[in-house]
Image (tube, rainbow, N blue to C red):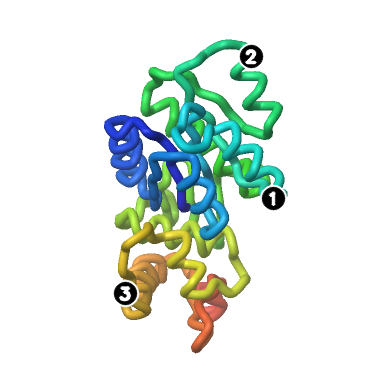
Amino acid sequence: MRILIAEDDSILADGLTRSLRNSGYAVDAVSDGMAADSALIAQEFDLLILDIGLPKMSGHDVLSRLRARNSRLPVLILTAADSIEQRVKGLDLGADDYMAKPFSLSELEARVRALARRGAGGGATILRHGRLVFDQTGRVALVDDQTLELSAREVSLLEILLTRSGRMVSKNQIVDHLCEWGEEVSSNAIEVYVHRLRKKIEPSGVKIATVRGLGYCLERDTSAQSAST
């Protein structure tokens, strides 16, 4: 999952970025409204955390332009102004949620998870594929109630594959959702992440199939199922 933070307070932006990255999200940050607007036009994100009081272009204008492009990207507004008028204006322009500064990081992360689920169509927080279970809220994977030891990158990769189960996921799609600006990730690196994850989920009977030259697809390992019956 890839998040854009538009916040001109560098200390707050750095704190949010570190916290969300530690939770396994890919995070990019900009410090003014024009940069946020350009980023949203050029790149696909899964969530926007938007400060209202941005320089060069206000958060309200960024939001208005985003919705004018018919984007359904989930937006969480941050503002130091906790007036009813400001809150109503933001929601009327198309914001999905609203937080007044100061706030707790744990609450913000809970709202991020809720908005991410809403952006994915309001699906369940528990994804199941055979004996493999993934908890999107706790960001933990289990096989037969045993927790898998996965890195943050592997967790994000598994989530991408599970939410597109049965469909081909290209390497470019994986890079877009896994990686941040300026992060050089080669095709070989993606193959390494897939290889490591594949070995860890094989005991569950779930297989990551390679679609040569195109990408990857998560499927049930029917041969493993037949052998166990």
Q: Quadrant of the C terminus?
A: bottom right
**Residue at the spot of label 3:** 189
Residues under labels 3 and 2: Cα distance? 48 Å
Residue 99 percent coordinates (x, y): 50, 23
Residue with the most extreme bottom position: 212
CA neighbours of label 2 inside 10 A, class few (<14), some (14 to 19), many (20+):
few
Residue name at image x 40 percent, y 66 percent = 201
Instruction: From the viewer's side, name the closer residue of 40 and 128.
Output: 40
**Residue at the spot of label 1:** 69
Pointer 3 and pointer 2: residues touching (CB < 8 Å)? no
Residue type, label 3: Ala
Residue 198 percent coordinates (x, y): 39, 72
Residue 195 located left or right of residue 95: left
Which circle's residue, 3 or 1, is located before the other in the chain? Answer: 1
CA neighbours of label 1 inside 10 A, class few (<14), some (14 to 19), many (20+):
few
Image depth: mark 3 or mark 1 in front: 1
**Residue at the spot of label 2:** 85
Instruction: From the viewer's side, name the closer residue of 8 and 191.
Output: 8
- Give the secondary structure at mark 2: helix
Residue 176 located left or right of residue 71: left
Residue 213 located left or right of residue 152: right
CA neighbours of label 3 inside 10 A, class few (<14), some (14 to 19), many (20+):
few
